Image: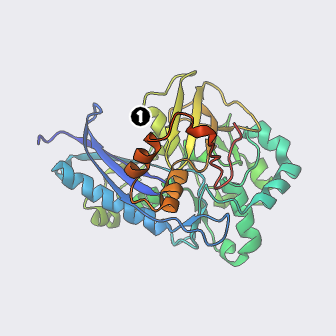
Amino acid sequence: MSAEQLLLGVDIGTTNAKALLATPHGEVVAQATASYPLSTPQPGWVEQNPEDWWRGAVQVMRSVVQAAGADVDQVAAIGISGQGCAATLIDREGNVLRPSIIWMDARSEAQCERMRQSAGERILRINGKRPAPYNFDPKLVWLQEHEPDVFARAWHSLTTTGYVNFRLTGEPVLNVSDASIPFAFDQQACEWSDELIEAFGMPRYLYPPVAPSQHIIGGLLPSAAQATGLKPGIPVIAGGEDTSAAGLSVGVVDPGQAMLSLGTGGSIYIVTPTPLAHPQLLIFAHVLERKWFVGGTIVAFGASLAWGRDLLGHSDFDQMTALAAQSEPGARGLIFLPYLSGELQPI
């Protein structure tokens, strides 16, 4: 193939890492994927090992370059997206202190209720949302209360994208679309709210610097270059939360445009020119500056299909599709309510 420059995109989703190489004009040259597990140590708890994210990212980056038959000199820049809301504690040496508590986890309901009682109106005014267990901040409060020794050693709490970017560049930074989901984010200022961080009783240092999604946060570290097979110094941008990044990729960029995103969870969002506060919806920043998404997510969309597949003892989804095709429209009135892990927004 020609020596045209290529852009490397990686998504660290809930169950899979995915990568693609594309030309600057948007032509996809190659794709790769790798899976990793979820852990459910107790009912309502959902965790992942951040090392699995890193191994998945390394695997797909190597695989996609090989699949494209590309020279590593062609890779001009790297952008990472990923599942939002994960609370990943690292110490000052960059070591992960415990498994990451991800967005599907529901253990912090009691902490959320206290946040609603003590700061609910301020959170809605500044951040635009109502506290719920999917998010970053109540997980931190839970860790402070239940694992104080671990919490005391923490330097930053990183999201999925933030952690992989940290491994790539050594810079602890959150992109604005990731950072705008936590309840301590000021949507108008596009920065952390010291008022809300103090209200939550959190140390300010747990909340890393915030950067625009297109901002170059650093170059590829020699250690990361050795792991991925790429050249040191390749620019790495701040990237985006996966739904925000998906909005850009499918052209949902203008106010009034809407997007249905179906993966492990299922989401529907509309683009707005200003942040809209609503206690039953989710508001967060687009990867494009001064635009926002508002909408809602159900936790178990694709996860419900996987649960049904395993429950029925099928080896793949094609078997399930063939069986479903034998049923008459409406399935004789059978309705499935996909609340296997509760709900995020009741829409």
- What kind of residue is marked 1? Ser
Q: Is any atom of residue 40 visible in this view?
A: yes
- Label 1 Cα crowd, 10 Å radius (few <14 / some 14-19 / many 20+): few
Q: Which residue does the numbered mark 1 point to in the structure image?
A: 249
Splitting the image into 4 quarters, where does residue 6 fall? Answer: top left
In the picture provided, is 346 more to the left or to the right than 271? right
In the picture provided, is 124 more to the left or to the right than 8? right
Which residue occupies the foreground of this view, 198 or 340? 340
In the picture provided, is 181 more to the left or to the right than 21? right
Q: Where does residue 335 sit, x and y in percent of width and height?
A: 63, 42
In the picture provided, is 283 more to the left or to the right than 130? left
Tell me what residue is drawn at x 48 percent, y 28 percent: 252
Tell me what residue is drawn at x 61 percent, y 67 percent: 155
Of all residues shown, which one is farthest toward the right? 117
Tell me what residue is drawn at x 71 percent, y 48 percent: 184
Q: Is any atom of residue 72 visible in this view?
A: no
Q: Where does residue 50 sit, x and y in percent of width and height?
A: 49, 66
Q: Where does residue 127 sit, x and y in percent of width and height?
A: 72, 40
Q: Is residue 225 above or below residue 259?
A: below
